[in-house]
Amino acid sequence: MRTGDFADAKGEGYALLLSLPFRRQVLNQIVDVTTRHLRAARARGAGLKVYFAEKGAADLVRKEFKKRDLGDVVVGLLPPSRPR
């Protein structure tokens, strides 16, 4: 990531949503939102990184993005911090 790049963070619960029978609809919504964010980022000459709180969700979405020609979007893992 560079200064000025766009970022989006998805919290906990996506791994569960993506394991249910309606996962295709969830993926379609993620792709739709990401496509809009990427369009805005590109208009400003910036990149886009989408963070997921759960590894399973990040891995699945990363594969889906590659299939749907969104490979320029960086998918990262950013687990929530827990109070000590």
Image (cartoon, rainbow, N blue to C red):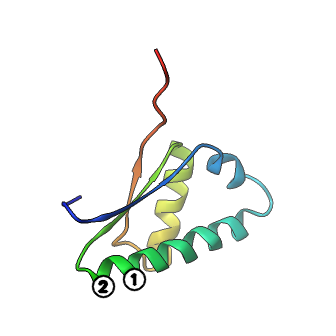
From the viewer's side, name the closer residue of 14 and 45. Answer: 45
Q: Do the residues labelled 2 and 1 touch (CB within 8 Å)?
A: yes
Using the rendered view, name the quadrant where residue 81 is placed: top left
The correct choice, above or below, for 32 with respect to 17 in the image is below
**Three-letter residue code for mark 2:** Ala
Packing grade of label 2 (10 A; few <14, some 14-19, many >=20) is few
Q: Mark 1 points at which residue?
A: 39
From the viewer's side, name the closer residue of 33 and 67. Answer: 33
Using the rendered view, name the quadrant where residue 7 is placed: bottom left
For image coordinates 56% across by 46% down, the residue present is 11
* Residue 73 pos. (x, y %): 37, 68
For image coordinates 70% across by 47% down, the residue present is 16
Q: Which mark is residue 43?
A: 2
Could you tell me which quadrant the N terminus lies in? bottom left
* Residue 38 pos. (x, y %): 39, 76
Packing grade of label 1 (10 A; few <14, some 14-19, many >=20) is some
